[in-house]
Image (spheres, rainbow, N blue to C red):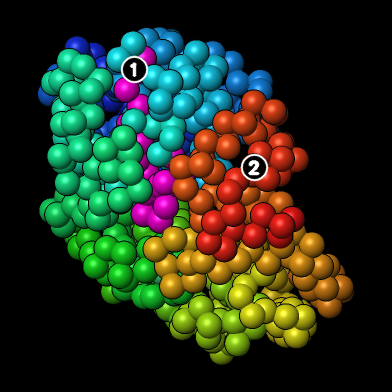
Amino acid sequence: MRKRLADEIGRLDKEAPRKVALVYPSPYGAAMSSLGYQRIYRAIMETPGMSCERVVLDDDAETELAKQTRPQSYESGRELADFPVLAVSVAYELEIAGLVALLEAAGIPPRRKDRDGRYPFVLAGGPLTFSNPLPLAGIVDAICIGEAEEISIQALDTIFAESTHAARLDALAKIPHMFVPSHHGEMLPLVAKVPEEMLPAWAPIRTPHAVLSNMFLLETERGCSRRCTYCVMRRSTNGGMRLVSMEKILATIPADARRVGLVGAAVSDHPKIVQIVNTLADQGREVGLSSLRPDRISTEFAGALKRAGYKTLTTAMDGPSERMREMLERKAKVKHLIRCAELAREHKMDRLKLYLMIGLPGENDADMDECAAFTTELSRIIPVSLGIAPFCAKRNTPLDGQPYAGVAVVTDRLDRLRRGLKGRADVRSTSAKWAWVEYVLAQGGEAEGLLVIDAVHAGGRFADYKRAFAKAKPRRSLAIAAV
Ligand code: SF4
């Protein structure tokens, strides 16, 4: 921890009477690469009379949750249970286990109903709240739904102002966009949206120990104007895309930041993205984009990316076939992907990396064969890597309620794809088993979230989740039998 603190640039050192533990239920490298977590860190540190200290999951606890040591803050070594309030950022479903492990290791009961005013107040927020925060409802006391830089501070002010646990819950339940499970049941409030003047979010801390090493992170836009049918950030979620002007983006970047990460749901849709990347390259900086749509790539754009240090052109194939991409309402067509491969080669990049999902509704072997044939065609232009994730339906999207294809089906389709490719592309996939766990939680509610506690107690392995979720009452499309 000392070494990591010594290597940080931009930390905001501040002591204040109202202290918050800012918790990230994944290891340090992921926490410091989360723009949302760092944005809330800055919001708390800029609030008079309030400060926060960071608490994250042990590095090896992600794979072995039982090994989580007693959590302490990075800044002062204070124990997690000694903070009056924990503010937790949850990115996605599988991090709920990390939160449970942190609470248990700190001696804090992970079930909301087992806690009272003697324990820290547990406030949650983060990307998970855009789709389905209900699995957190039996674990945390209150949840900020949506964009949290304003409401999280309002919630923290309220928690510190009230003296009893019950009064805190009553007061929080009256704040718009706050979800207080003890008061609201399963009725979720609308997603919060901050005024445009508050954009862009940027991350104060840069460190070589982040997954995005030494990168200054800032957003170029928020939300997305497209409407891919599986995506939580689609146009309808928060009213489309809010742009940050090029001038504001460039003025926010510190002079000494050699690496810049442009973050957003649809960074390449920024109308001045080529100019922004070129300007940063002119200043001698390396640039990374968190999202690049294949239909936005042009000669100028690929050239700018090359100048800004790109060796691999990474974009999305989305689904394995044209038919599946149409079902997902993606604008990316075969011609765009071929153009990406050609431009990557022209600009002397090493590789084209394409992300896609498999196990989509209505998908069959013919889609995998088309994927293998098309990827083979691309690999004749430039070396190709495929990054594959099994499809998990999310709430608050048109594909909500679609079943999980099943571990065996996803595994078979991957095998078929690999056979079809005959080694002509590098294929990496996230786990079909863990995608099922993610799916059950994405489609589940408070009961499924509480079963994570049982799974973590039993060791947190896939078999432990399988046993724990077998106890869930069948609801909606939860195909527990899918495994
Ligand atoms: S997948 Fe990307 S492009 Fe599609 S709606 Fe979501 S953020 Fe926008």
Quick check: can you spot residue 439? no
Pick out the residue farthest to the front. 473
| The label number, if any, that marks residue 116 in the structure image | 1
* Side of 60 where 106 appears, left or right: left
Q: Residue at x 32, y 22 (%)?
A: 121
- Quarter location, residue 352: bottom right
Q: Tell me the element at label 1.
A: loop
Q: Which of 86 and 60 lies nearest the eye of the viewer?
A: 86
Q: Residue at x 27, y 63 (%)?
A: 238
The tag earlier along the polypeptide, 2 or 1, is 1
Q: Magenta residues?
A: 119-136
Check disc 2: other Cα within 10 Å, few if <14, some if 14-19, many if 20+: few
Q: Nearer the viewer, mark 2 or mark 1?
A: 2
Quadrant in which the C terminus appears = bottom right
Q: Which of 58 and 32 lies nearest the eye of the viewer?
A: 58
Quick check: can you spot residue 186? yes
Q: Is residue 126 magenta?
A: yes
